[in-house]
Image (cartoon, grey):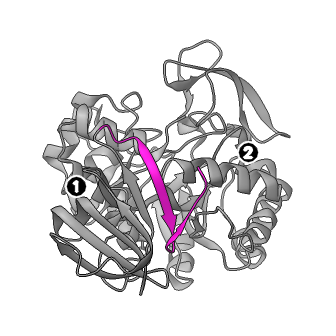
């Protein structure tokens, strides 16, 4: 007897869409995937998709919060609230993300994450923390606070690693900052993914950083250098390095605002699709009504305004963070960038699972993998979400 049978819909399988497909789930694991009529209907739950889409659960490797909470608030409730808001939009695995901060606040984030890991009811998988900073270039601070940025020294980052309970999965830094190359070596030895962000590096520095394990460009185009002229010579920046080096993964905040549709189309023409990862990079206002909000933790923040589908600085001269959810990213990639649905979904399921090295257990609909699943309609509106075969409350 199976736990769940999904049938009569489009299955976004590991090798492409399966029209009129079915999926059988047993003990929280995908037991069988096929096409046509299921071999039996002997199950605790049968789900007639009625033409809807069954997708792998979404994986967001870069999010700061949602639902009115920020992961840097330093409370278990903030971790649960933000995670559950993303879960309602189809994210079954996520990486809570920090910002450049003082150590006390960073350690509060780490401790609340560790405690939240023991909560499983109506929760996505917590795949590990993403540290975004503090080793950045103040010239590329963006919406982060320049005064919180530091130069890395071993006694500092080793203290952070020791305090992290082994929960760091990726760490974003600026490779031109002295000491960041050496940090990359340490991270690789600890199984942590080094990423490049908030940086003024040119492409030659990026190339050297790749030799120290840096394999991902955080929020592509945001907070990073581009082509410039120096004494008449054209010098490539981080953006061009992302195009030039096939082995680099790039993150896209595909909300249609940070990166407009035409730019997304250009990226899709120039970059291998299996090295593109969609991220929300969302702040606390994700999933909330538009209006006044704050960027940062409850302790250290500044006022922002959320309007037109994005958070803006008070003077409206720059963005102050994304308010996107994972389903919105897919809609933008399909309707504004013109990407086939299954390819867009791969960019927030299969691709991040491969980067995080968890593709052996999740990230695609295949036999033996976790039944982390999302049902959505033709408009990519989420209707049902399952984590390890358990339907969650929306």
Q: Distance between the residues labelled 1 and 2?
A: 40 Å
Residue depicted at x 75% and y 74%: 118
Residue depicted at x 19% and y 43%: 339
Where is residue 53 drawn, in percent x and y?
Answer: 29, 53
* Residue range of the region highlighted in magenta in the rendering: 379-394
What numbered label is drawn on residue 148? 2
- Dot 2, crowdedness within 10 Å: few (<14), some or many (≥20)? some
* Left or right position of 44 against 236: right
* Left or right position of 327 against 269: right
Q: Name the residue under label 1.
A: 342
Inspect this view and state whether residue 237 appears.
no
Q: Where is the N terminus found, in terms of image quarters?
A: bottom left
- Dot 1, crowdedness within 10 Å: few (<14), some or many (≥20)? some
Q: Nearer the viewer, residue 324 or 188?
A: 324
* Left or right position of 371 against 67: left
Local SS, label 2? helix
The magenta stretch spans residue 122: no
Vertical arrangement, residue 227 with respect to residue 31, above or below: above
Q: Mark 1, mark 2: which one is toward the viewer?
A: 1
């Amino acid at each position: 007897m199976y736990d769940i049978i999904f049938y009569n819909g489009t299955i976004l399988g590991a090798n492409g869409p399966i029209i009129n497909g079915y999926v059988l789930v047993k003990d929280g694991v995908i037991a069988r995937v096929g096409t046509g009529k299921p071999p039996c209907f002997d199950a605790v739950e049968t789900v007639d998709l009625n033409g809807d889409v069954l997708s792998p659960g979404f994986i967001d490797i870069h999010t700061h919060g949602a639902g009115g909470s920020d992961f840097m608030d330093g409370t278990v409730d903030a971790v649960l609230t933000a995670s559950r808001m993303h879960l309602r939009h189809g994210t079954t695995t996520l990486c809570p993300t920090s910002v450049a901060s003082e150590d006390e606040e960073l350690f509060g984030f780490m401790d609340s994450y560790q405690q939240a890991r023991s909560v499983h009811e109506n929760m996505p998988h917590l795949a590990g923390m993403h540290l975004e900073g503090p080793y950045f270039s103040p010239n590329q601070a963006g919406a982060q606070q320049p005064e919180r940025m530091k130069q890395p020294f071993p006694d500092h980052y080793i203290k952070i690693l020791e305090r992290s309970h082994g929960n760091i999965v990726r760490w974003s830094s600026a490779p031109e900052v002295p000491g960041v190359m050496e940090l990359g070596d340490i991270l690789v030895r600890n199984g942590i993914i080094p990423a490049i962000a908030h940086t003024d590096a040119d492409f030659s520095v990026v190339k050297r950083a790749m030799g120290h394990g840096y394999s991902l460009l955080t929020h592509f185009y945001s907070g990073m250098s581009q082509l410039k002229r120096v004494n008449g010579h054209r010098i490539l920046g981080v953006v061009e390095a992302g195009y030039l080096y096939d082995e680099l993964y790039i993150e896209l905040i595909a909300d249609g605002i940070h990166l407009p549709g035409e730019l997304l189309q250009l990226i899709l023409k120039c970059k291998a699709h299996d090295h593109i990862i969609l991220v929300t990079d969302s702040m606390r206002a994700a999933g909330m009504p538009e209006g006044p909000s704050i960027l940062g933790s409850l302790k250290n923040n500044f006022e922002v305004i959320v309007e037109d589908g994005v958070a803006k600085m008070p003077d409206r001269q720059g963005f102050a963070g994304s308010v996107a959810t994972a389903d919105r990213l897919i809609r933008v990639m399909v309707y504004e960038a013109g990407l086939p649905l299954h390819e867009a979904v791969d960019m927030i399921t299969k691709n991040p699972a491969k980067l995080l090295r968890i593709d052996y257990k999740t990230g695609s609909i295949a036999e033996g993998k976790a039944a982390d699943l999302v049902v959505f309609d033709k408009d990519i509106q989420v209707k049902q979400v399952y984590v390890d075969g358990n339907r969650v409350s929306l």
